């Protein structure tokens, strides 16, 4: 059965195409900097936003019209798998991602939930045999069910800690079964509401213990996925333990986990933390911790996680610049952790949204590669720090100075000449690149 009957394969038609069901900029085979767009961008579809999301919000019920919603229970789960692979095929997307409860309904007991998962995973595995779409990552949803009200690995209840571990254990087994390239931990409830009832030290120590047990179990079963922490500063709790990349990295180092994890960086989480998307990518990159990306964008006027599809070309350009400087994403990818707006309720909107997101990152890739090829930003940065290439600067960098030497140097200074930062000129240059890249096409 077809769920998107009126929609065919989405093809690349070029920048001037007026066909809404065509890519204007994402040309999977086009080579940029020696790699095809498909190899470089590694797009993924998020199962939860695309196949289970009903578009409800705190003030209103779901509006989504989804042809598979006529089914219930396990039949619904099976229909979603059929719809998902039809969607992946038509979009030509290389990856997908899911939480356990996105693909199979929870049963009355853990055993029953795992049986439901086994049935659906077998079906997914079967579909994957005839599909080029692979598993970018899976994860355990340890935040939706009321049992996680006080947290999961950081819960005040040891029973909940054990339950959360059992769910992650099962997902690690499923990741291995489906050939998942990464495994994600987003600490949905790993944080706290108030210190008045919280033992923060115990909670963080437990979180560290939990991650070590996950690393050990993956090793035990021979699952070699890259483990990823997905930082988020708040929502649902007011204080999340993995606030941003910097605090997550400190946590990983403190608990001696830094060699087993990288970061999955989500644009909207970065902005919620008061950072830019590129700040988080950059921080991870320079520490060799950039693993994967949840590609979305927040609404600039709203202070919560709106998970919009990315369409801001300036942001995708600066993000792709970081990714190119990182030498790509390795096993990671660009997963659209993004949902259509409540008013975009038709099934077709799922295609329009992904096309918009894929085209936006394709533009970002092309512009970022041009900026690199022309040495635009690198040249500016090198020039700005040129004082560290000779004289006292070289001594500082090479560790050949101390405060006595530096004081002597400072006493000898009559003037300090520093060049302008030229931010406005840099922005104008980026605009020039954005506007001229497709001029002839
Ligand atoms: C929530 C979020 C999650 C993670 C996976 O803000 O981003 O969907 O990506 O649990
Ligand atoms: Co996410």
Image (tube, helix red, strand yellow):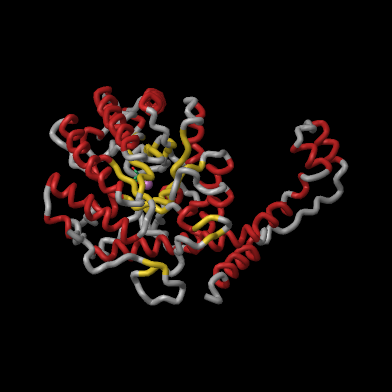
Residue 32 placed where, x, y %? Answer: 55, 60
Provide residue 143's location: percent of width, then percent of height.
28, 38
* Quadrant location, the N terminus: bottom left
Residue 171 in which image quadrant: top left
Seen as rendered, the residue at the extreme front is 130
Is 335 situated left or right of 391 in this image?
Answer: left
| Residue plotted at (33% across, 33% down) | 172
Judging depth in this view, the residue of 398 and 217 nearest the camera is 217
Q: Is residue 239 visible?
A: no
Establish if 16 lies above or below 59.
Answer: below
Residue at x 28%, y 31% (from the top left corner): 170
Relative placement, left or right, of 399 versus 68 is: right
Q: Is residue 404 left or right of residue 137?
A: right
Residue 123 place in picture, x, y as percent: 22, 44
The reply to whether residue 277 is in sight is: yes
Write down the quadrant of residue 175 in the picture. top left
């Amino acid at each position: 059965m077809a769920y998107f009957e009126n929609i065919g394969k989405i093809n690349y038609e070029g920048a001037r195409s007026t066909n809404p069901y065509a890519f204007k900029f994402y040309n999977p085979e086009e080579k940029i900097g020696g790699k095809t767009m498909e190899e470089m961008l590694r797009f993924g579809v998020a199962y939860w936003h695309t196949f289970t999301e009903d578009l409800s919000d705190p003030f209103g019920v779901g509006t989504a019209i989804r042809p598979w919603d006529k089914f219930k229970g396990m039949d619904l789960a099976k229909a979603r798998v059929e719809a998902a692979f039809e969607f992946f095929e038509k979009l030509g997307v290389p990856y997908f991602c899911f939480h356990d409860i996105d693909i199979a309904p929870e049963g009355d007991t853990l055993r029953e939930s795992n049986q439901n998962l086994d049935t659906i995973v077998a079906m997914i595995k079967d579909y994957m045999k005839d599909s080029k779409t692979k598993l970018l990552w899976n994860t355990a949803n340890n935040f939706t069910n009321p049992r996680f009200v006080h947290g999961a690995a950081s819960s005040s209840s040891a029973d909940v800690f054990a339950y959360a571990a059992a769910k992650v254990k099962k997902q690690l087994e499923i990741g291995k079964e489906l050939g998942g390239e990464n495994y994600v931990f987003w600490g949905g409830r790993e944080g706290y509401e108030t210190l008045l009832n919280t033992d923060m030290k115990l909670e963080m120590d437990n979180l560290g213990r939990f991650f070590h047990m996950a690393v050990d179990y993956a090793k035990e079963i021979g699952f070699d996925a890259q483990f990823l922490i997905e930082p988020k500063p708040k929502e649902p709790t007011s204080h999340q333990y993995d606030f941003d990349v910097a605090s997550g990295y400190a946590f990983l180092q403190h608990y001696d986990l830094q060699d087993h994890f990288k970061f999955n960086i989500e644009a909207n989480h970065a902005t919620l933390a008061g950072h830019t998307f590129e700040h988080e990518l950059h921080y991870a990159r320079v520490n060799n911790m950039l693993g994967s990306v949840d590609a979305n964008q927040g609404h600039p006027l709203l202070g919560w996680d709106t998970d919009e599809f990315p369409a801001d070309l300036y942001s995708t350009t600066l993000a792709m610049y970081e990714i190119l400087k990182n030498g790509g994403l390795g096993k990671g990818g660009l997963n659209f952790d993004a949902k259509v707006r409540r008013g975009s309720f038709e099934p077709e909107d799922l295609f329009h949204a992904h096309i918009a997101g894929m085209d936006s990152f394709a533009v970002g890739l092309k512009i970022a590669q041009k900026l690199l090829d022309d040495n635009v930003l690198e040249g500016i940065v090198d020039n700005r720090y040129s004082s560290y290439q000779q004289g006292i600067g070289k001594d500082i960098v090479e560790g050949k100075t101390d405060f006595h030497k530096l004081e002597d140097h400072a006493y000898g200074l009559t003037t300090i000449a520093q060049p302008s930062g030229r931010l406005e000129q840099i922005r104008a240059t980026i605009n020039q690149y954005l506007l001229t890249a497709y001029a002839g096409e």
